[in-house]
Amino acid sequence: MDEQIVETLRSGIQRILPAITDLRHSLHAEPELGLETVKTSLRICEALSGTSIVLRDPLLGNDVIGELRGNGGKTVCLRADIDAVPVQEQNDLPYKSKIPGIMHACGHDGHTAMLVGAALVLDSLRDHLSANVRFVFQPGEEVICAGKTLVERGACDGCDAAYAIHDWPGLPLGCVSSKEEPLFAAGSHFEIRVKGKGCHGAMPERGRNPIPAAARIVERLRQMHIELNAAEGAVISVCSFQSGNTGNVIPDTAKILGTTRYLSQETGSRIEKAIRKIVTQEASEANVTAEMDNDASYDLPVLNTSEGYRITRELAERYCDWREAERPYMTMDDFAYYLKGREGAMFLLGLGESAPDLHSPAFDFNDEALGVGILMLCLIALSY
């Protein structure tokens, strides 16, 4: 790549960084869940106004898709997720979340700000673009798997490649990391409902307590996780147990919520069947009934292609700080569906080795990483 263009690129990033940081803070202060990213989408559109980027009609309601025309035939998709998570923020920040019980605890405010930054800089360098660039700002990455629907509705139609960033606490600040083939896992969300018969806590013989059966299910799932994780890295996590609301009434029901993670659909199917068998056995032995729903929408791992990985690695080695990812991570991301049938990669951006974990109430995207993320997105687009 022409070093003069890279220097111009770096200068352009430095020029917009204050505004991009302010944008990130404003997004952090007013997080929105799922597909209801009305204010977030409006801010993105406002930031892109006055550029050469042509905005398309939304495909999900609050997605923002823009196209920047280059001088060639190929089209590269750059994607950012824009939704928040239902976590109560504990940080004392000037821009802390104003919305009770909701915060950007996964760094999507940073992802969004970096992609806006890349769009602004690439617009100023459009005469040097050989490829077209499609910017996709996607709601509903958390739990809903809206990326799958967005791709099915045509968000990536005509795209030759797709790339995305995921911020990563634990990696050195500003370093870039990835690997070929699976970077993130596939997975599911499950809900188990155990139904008995409620009664007075002083007369348990008059009811059928669902809690002991549900507790045994939880313990068996914990043991199953230990065995599967040791054998093949798969994950089974119980994340919520809900039953009753007082100390002297046996409830009718108990509800268990959790998630599974795996690297192949065969393993996912095997895990689901094993969980269903445990649920059926424990319910039968306790003379209660049980139902299980398993949402396997995220059935595809993030599979970086050889070419996408090579491009990412070579650019990061030359212009940033590269760290090879040693293994797949058991997080999941619906960017997997953007990669289906086209080249590309997701790469990790280090937020610092002592940064709070993702989905933690203490999490905050490290603004010092914004410039590196913008640089990588621009370099990838300019490399086509």
Image: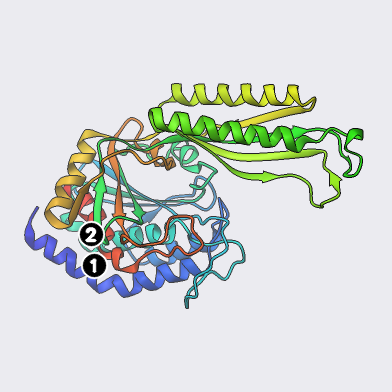
Mark linked to residue 359: none
Mark linked to residue 13: 1
Farthest bottom residue in view: 94
Residue 263 in sight here: no
Sort mark 1 into few (<14), some (14-19) or many (20+) by Cα contacts within 10 Å. many
Kind of residue sitting beneath label 1: Ile
Q: Nearer the viewer, residue 77 or 375?
A: 375
Q: Position of residue 176 (x, y in %)?
A: 24, 53
Q: Position of residue 83 (x, y in %)?
A: 50, 55
Kind of residue sitting beneath label 2: Leu
Colouring: rainbow
Instruction: State which quadrant residue 345 falls in.
Output: top left
Identify the residue at horizontal 28%, vertical 58% (top origin). 373
The secondary element bearing badge 1 is classed as helix
The secondary element bearing badge 2 is classed as helix
Q: CA distance from mark 1 to mark 2?
A: 7 Å
Left or right side of 30 for 54: left
Q: Position of residue 340 (x, y in %)?
A: 36, 32
Q: Earlier in the sequence, mark 1 or mark 2?
A: 1
Left or right side of 122 for 220: right
Q: Nearer the viewer, residue 12 or 82?
A: 82
Instruction: State which quadrant residue 204 falls in.
Output: top right
The relative height of residue 280 versus residue 88 in the rendered view (above or below) is above
In the picture, the quarter occupied by the C terminus is top left
Contact flag, marks 1 and 2 (Cβ < 8 Å): yes
Sort mark 2 into few (<14), some (14-19) or many (20+) by Cα contacts within 10 Å. many
Residue 16 in sight here: yes
Left or right side of 39 for 68: left
Q: Position of residue 257 (x, y in %)?
A: 62, 40
Identify the residue at horizontal 57%, vertical 32% (top origin). 221
Q: Which residue is mark 2?
A: 375
